[in-house]
Image (cartoon, rainbow, N blue to C red):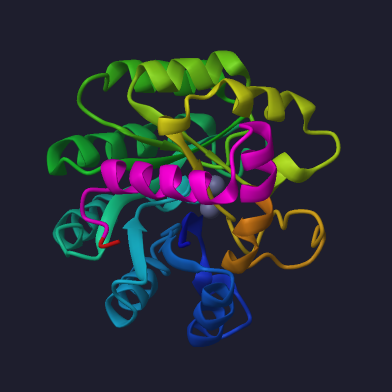
Amino acid sequence: MSWIDVHTHINMLEATPEETLRVAAEQNVNHLITIGTCPDDLPVVLNLARQFTPFVACTLGIHPHEAALYTTEIEQWIRANAGAPEVVAIGETGLDYYYNNSPREVQLHAFRAQMQIAADLKLPIEIHTRDAEPDTMQVLKEFSGRVRGLLHCFTGTWEMAKFGLDHEFNISISGVVTFKNAEALRDVVRQVPLDRLHVETDAPFLAPIPHRGKKNQPAWVVHTAQVVADLKALSLADLERATGQNAKRLFAKLRL
Ligand SMILES: [Zn+2]
Ligand SMILES: [Zn+2]
């Protein structure tokens, strides 16, 4: 078996990338996508992906928390580098109205601009959305038919999930699904078609049970996978196969 963690931040872990990959491989987590979030970490994730290809791929984008740092200059840098074989998607971008670390209008501007990059370069996009469903739906609608991607660390309503699915966005499930109070999310997982589902860690954040509260790592995606497999009444092997195929279909440049 071989798992892929479709959303992680291995540059934010205390362990070296070598150690992170070694521990992950012990759990058959053999591929991961490490995610760009801000101008400083974009060259870092790109270098990691180059150094550890094909086990590590990356995305290039500016997180909604950092949307105030989205400039013409950084946009040009993303456009100039996104053609590299290791860059499998744009993101993470999106809207976070829970923290509002950047003003909403600024987040919306950076989100739309990155959707345009994904459309122009024909790359998928990883979207972060929290407490911002109406505006997220609005932007997905504007780019309907032009951009596909992933709603990462999905914790929203079934209405949001359905809207994403109808607009060519797959649903990625993090360790949150293992939490006791996540019954609504488990209901969403039951309803998402198997060929549109992914698992991720978002490490170092959101460690799944039984590691909740610790710093997360890609190896632990297997705990999330076990809960998702149970919800779908599948064996782990069947879920591994399905999520692997889904990742291959969505991220065309991924070398699995
Ligand atoms: Zn995120
Ligand atoms: Zn993330």
Residue sitting at 50 percent across and 44 percent down? 238
Q: In this view, does 251 lie to the left or right of 25?
A: left
Asked whether the viewer can see residue 231, the reply is yes
222 or 140: which is nearer to us? 222
- Name the foreground residue: 28 vs 188: 28
Tell me where residue 150 sits by quadrant. Answer: top left
Q: In this view, does 5 lie to the left or right of 88?
A: right
Q: Give the range drawn in magenta.
A: 225-254
The answer to whether 63 appears left or right of 20 in the picture is: left
Tell me: 25 left or right of 217. left
Which one is nearer the viewer's eye here, 9 or 191?
191
What residue lies at 29% left-to-right and 75% top-to-bottom?
A: 53
Residue drawn where x is 42% and y is 31% of the image: 196
Coordinates of residue 69 in the picture (x, y in percent): 42, 53
Residue 59 location, quadrant: bottom left
The answer to whether residue 99 of the structure is visible from this angle is no
Q: Nearer the viewer, residue 163 or 21?
A: 21
The image quadrant where one finds the C terminus is bottom left
Residue 253 sits above or below residue 196 on the image = below
Residue 45 in magenta stretch: no
> Residue 103: image x %, image y %?
54, 36
Q: Which residue lies furthest to the right in this view?
A: 180
Image coordinates of residue 120 in percent, x first then y, are: 13, 38
Measured along the vertical axis of the image, is residue 170 above or below residue 5?
Answer: above
Residue name at image x 69 percent, y 55 percent: 223
Report the magenta stretch's main SS.
Answer: helix
